[in-house]
Amino acid sequence: MNPWLNQIIPNIEVVWDVGANDGYFTYGCAHAIKRYHNEGYIIAFEPALAQQSGLSIPATLPQYNGINFEFIPLFVGAVSNNSTITLNNAYQARPSLHSKPSLIKVDVEGAEIEVLKGASLLLKNPHHWVVEVHGDHLLEPVLNFFANAKRLVNIHPPKPHWLLGSESRTIKTSWVTTQLD
């Protein structure tokens, strides 16, 4: 996936990090965006934000000046309520970001379909997606969402880490990325 990310990051101004966890992807993208732009915007969704206190702390470091971070302690799904928000609602609430190309990363441990149900506005070009699909049973439904949005995708099986080898998982995972134009 690194070659794919290297190709799209120079054109990305906004990152929607759904399932931000400890911020590995959040801050990796912030660092990469700083290489190409003086500013950027990252919206990180993490329902366990209270338990991931380290997620928001690095945002104050000087190397991220110019990157606007927003941390949202909600689940992302098909409906908006007290504990959940849809990507459509989050996107509509930020009209200043509508003209900016976005990268949407989804890593939600099996709730991929719920996220996609609430994300029709962002499924369109020029936005790029990377979705970790947890289980073969979810792969076809995820692919159908992109097909219905007329988006071509690639499927990436996990590759062993060069030093640590294959990751041990109880469920098979793969990454789905939108194809480059």
Image (spheres, helix red, strand yellow):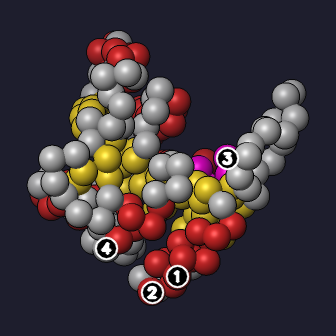
Left or right side of 143 for 50: left
Location of mark 2 (residue): 148
Location of mark 1 (residue): 144
Distance in Å between CA atoms under marks 3 and 2? 26 Å
| Label 1 residue SS | helix
Residue 43: quarter of image: top left
| Label 4 residue SS | loop
Q: Residue lying farthest front?
A: 170
Location of mark 3 (residue): 2
| Label 3 residue SS | helix
Location of mark 4 (residue): 120
Marks 1, 3: nearer the viewer: 1
Q: Quick one: label 1, few (<14), some, or many (20+) residues within 10 Å?
A: few
Relative image position of residue 180 (x, y in whole percent): 57, 68
Q: At 53% from the left edge and 72% from the top edge, which residue is drawn?
A: 142
Amino acid under label 3? Asn
Q: At 32% from the left edge and 52% from the top edge, which residue is drawn?
A: 76
Relative image position of residue 108 (x, y in whole percent): 48, 49
Distance in Å between CA atoms under marks 4 and 2? 10 Å
Amino acid under label 1? Asn
- Mark 4 or mark 2, which has the lower sequence index? 4
Kindly tell me whether residue 107 is visible in this rendering. Answer: yes
Kindly tell me whether residue 14 is visible in this rendering. Answer: no
- Disc 1 and disc 3 in contact, CB within 8 angstroms: no
- Disc 2 and disc 1 in contact, CB within 8 angstroms: yes
- Asked if residue 13 is among those painted magenta in the image, a careful observer would answer no
Left or right side of 31 for 170: right
